[in-house]
Image (spheres, rainbow, N blue to C red):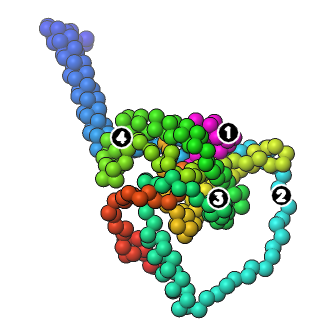
């Protein structure tokens, strides 16, 4: 037998339905807001990575991935192998030589007050030749050392760098980065770019060119050129010259045009080179002890 609905049942159901919908909507909004608050707290806890100049990014892996196999240049002929002649020192002399070399490099400091006194060009050529002995991926030697002595060009370089560096300090670098630099008393004023008798700008060649004109991959160009820079710093110290390692952020493209360098070269490091100024001062800093930088397994 068919049962009739109870009187008043329909109105009750029609009342509960919108209430239930409202409750579900409130619950969804609450879940969404809770998730949004958690995401916001996570963002606040995660430090913003420092701004990095595009020229300083190592894109070797990306270049290799994009390299089409059909575009690879022809394989070069095998290199002849020759005997390696090595000078072996007695252990006592090895210890002496290594200690003396450490003592020499221990005196190296970043000097921002550089004299206008000229330095022998032969010395500059020798230290760059020393840098050119660095190992490189597949022996591609992906470096170009641009030596600037012309006062007019040096001043143009200074103008470009100071213009960009002021923006770096005020906007790009971030408050923490700028705060960490305060103890070193550095800013966007780079007087040494005018006074140093020589500027050495080190460019990394992100790729080369084969004899047929096609692009040639320069493996690990960033690491290779960085090693060359380390040898260059050691050679300058050995020759009795001073410098300060600078990375002119966001200046690479303009300096590349100024110096008429090809587009496959990107500026990595700039070194003002010379003798220290008479009133040169350096921060009283100490280096980490051996047990803080060396682990023996």
Q: Which residue is mark 4?
A: 174
For the residue pair 151 and 248, the one nearer the viewer reads as 151
Question: Could you classify mark 3 by the number of other residues whose Cα lies within 10 Å: few (under 14), some (14-19), or many (20 or more)?
Answer: few
Residue range in magenta is 254-269
Q: Callout 4: helix, strand or loop? A: loop
Disc with the residue nearer the chain's start (4 vs 1): 4
Disc with the residue nearer the chain's start (4 vs 2): 2
Distance CA(mark 4)–CA(mark 1): 32 Å
Q: Nearer the viewer, mark 3 or mark 1?
A: 3
Q: Which residue is mark 2?
A: 76
Question: Could you classify mark 2 by the number of other residues whose Cα lies within 10 Å: few (under 14), some (14-19), or many (20 or more)?
Answer: few
**Residue drawn at x 52%, y 67% as measured from the top left:** 240
Which corner quadrant holds the C terminus? bottom left
- Against 33, is 294 above or below? below
Disc with the residue nearer the chain's start (3 vs 1): 3
Q: Say if the magenta span includes residue 256.
A: yes
For residue 142, which quarter of the picture? Answer: bottom right
Q: Nearer the viewer, mark 3 or mark 2?
A: 3
CB contact under 8 Å: marks 3 and 4: no
Question: Could you classify mark 4 by the number of other residues whose Cα lies within 10 Å: few (under 14), some (14-19), or many (20 or more)?
Answer: some
Distance CA(mark 3)–CA(mark 2): 35 Å
Q: Which residue is mark 3?
A: 121
Distance CA(mark 4)–CA(mark 2): 47 Å
Measured as percent of width and height from the top left, residue 40 is found at 29, 36
**Residue drawn at x 67%, y 39% as measured from the top left:** 260
Residue 260: numbered disc: 1
For residue 34, which quarter of the picture? Answer: top left
Q: Callout 3: helix, strand or loop? A: helix
- Against 164, is 56 above or below? below
Disc with the residue nearer the chain's start (3 vs 2): 2
Measured as percent of width and height from the top left, residue 280 is found at 39, 58
């Amino acid at each position: 037998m068919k049962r009739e609905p109870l009187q008043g049942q329909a109105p009750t159901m029609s009342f509960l339905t919108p209430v239930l919908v409202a409750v579900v909507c409130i619950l969804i909004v609450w879940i969404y807001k809770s998730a949004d608050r958690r995401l916001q707290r996570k963002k606040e806890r995660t430090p913003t990575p420092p701004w990095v100049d595009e020229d300083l990014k190592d894109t070797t892996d990306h270049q290799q991935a994009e390299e089409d196999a059909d575009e690879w240049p022809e394989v070069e002929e095998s290199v002849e192998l020759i005997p390696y002649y090595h000078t072996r020192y007695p252990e006592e002399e090895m210890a002496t030589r290594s200690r003396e070399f450490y003592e020499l490099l221990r005196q190296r400091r970043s000097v921002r007050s550089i004299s206008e006194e000229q330095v022998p060009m032969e010395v500059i050529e020798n230290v760059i030749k020393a840098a050119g002995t660095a190992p490189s991926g597949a022996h591609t030697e992906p470096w170009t050392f641009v030596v600037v002595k012309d006062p007019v060009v040096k001043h143009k370089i200074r103008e470009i760098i100071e213009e960009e560096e002021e923006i770096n300090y005020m906007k790009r670098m971030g408050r923490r980065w700028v705060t960490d630099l305060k103890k070193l008393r550095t800013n966007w004023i780079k007087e040494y770019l005018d006074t140093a008798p020589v500027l050495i700008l080190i460019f990394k060649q992100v790729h080369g060119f084969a004899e047929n004109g096609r692009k040639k991959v320069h493996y690990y160009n960033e690491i290779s050129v960085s090693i060359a820079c380390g040898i260059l710093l050691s050679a300058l110290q050995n020759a009795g010259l001073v410098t300060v390692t600078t990375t002119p952020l966001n200046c690479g493209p303009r300096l590349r045009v100024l110096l008429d360098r090809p587009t496959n070269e990107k500026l990595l490091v700039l070194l003002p080179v010379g003798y220290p100024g008479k009133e040169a001062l350096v921060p009283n800093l100490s280096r980490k002890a051996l047990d803080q930088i060396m682990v023996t397994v």
